[in-house]
Amino acid sequence: MTHEPRIRHVELANGGTAYAGFWCRLLAVLIDTALLLGVQVSLVVGVALMAPGDLRAAANLAPVSLAMFWAYFALLESSPLGATVGKIALEIYVTDAHGDPISFARASARYWLKTLSTLTLMVGWLMAAFTPQKQALHDVFAGTLVLRKGAATANVPPPVTEMSGEQWDGSQWVVQSTIRGEG
């Protein structure tokens, strides 16, 4: 079964693509980090209240935290929205190089490649300010783009779709839809 891509490049009037810039992406990361740190602080407080002074219990939070951050980014960026809470708030989303949604495997690779962007003394992150497609180092290696929504100026309206359900196929969210003809 083949399905049509649900997300396409947002094209500007001048024919360019609406790539999300460095500052917008940074703000999205800050929103996501604040959200995740709030959850993590709640976990730390809970463990401290349940097992005061138990260093092993506190140490067990490190792998839980790592898994939580990875799952948050990988699951949400490979979902039908293609975005985390921070990206949704700023109306940006992650796609592959063709503007299609990314798989869970690609989202996971993108997440772990952020370590490389950080280990380059943050130069990997700063690349998003200077590369033509606004890609950070982890985007280049993962083959992903971060695009802006709502910047389209196309004259042709998109086809109307009726959603008939979405499901997780083990590697990505699959939306089954039917396209109605234009009225």
Image: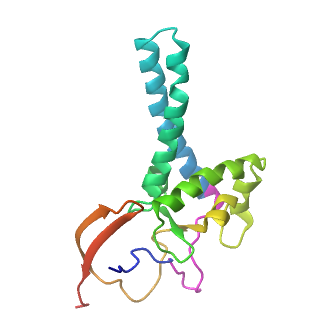
Q: Nearer the viewer, residue 148 or 39?
A: 39
Would you say residue 14 sits in the magenta stretch? yes
Which stretch is magenta? 10-23
Residue lying at 24% horizontally and 90% vertically, measured from the top left: 181
Q: Where residue 178 appears, x then y in whole percent?
A: 24, 80
Q: Where residue 138 appears, x then y in whole percent?
A: 65, 58
153 up-or-down from 30: above or below: below
Residue lying at 51% horizontally and 68% vertically, measured from the top left: 95
Where is residue 76, by image quadrant?
A: bottom left
Residue lying at 42% horizontally and 89% vertically, measured from the top left: 155
Q: Quadrant location of the C terminus?
A: bottom left
Q: Where residue 132 appears, x then y in whole percent?
A: 70, 73
Side of 155 relative to 138 (left or right) = left
Would you say residue 79 sits in the magenta stretch? no
- In terms of secondary structure, what is the magenta stretch mainly? loop
Residue lying at 43% horizontally and 53% vertically, measured from the top left: 75
Q: Quadrant location of the N terminus?
A: bottom left
Colour style of the rendered protein structure: rainbow
Label tally: 0
Side of 31 relative to 117 (left or right) = left
Q: Where residue 169 appears, x then y in whole percent?
A: 35, 63
Where is residue 13, by image quadrant?
A: bottom right
Q: Nearer the viewer, residue 182 or 104?
A: 104
Q: Residue furthest top?
A: 53
63 up-or-down from 18: above or below: above
58 up-or-down from 150: above or below: above
43 up-or-down from 162: above or below: above
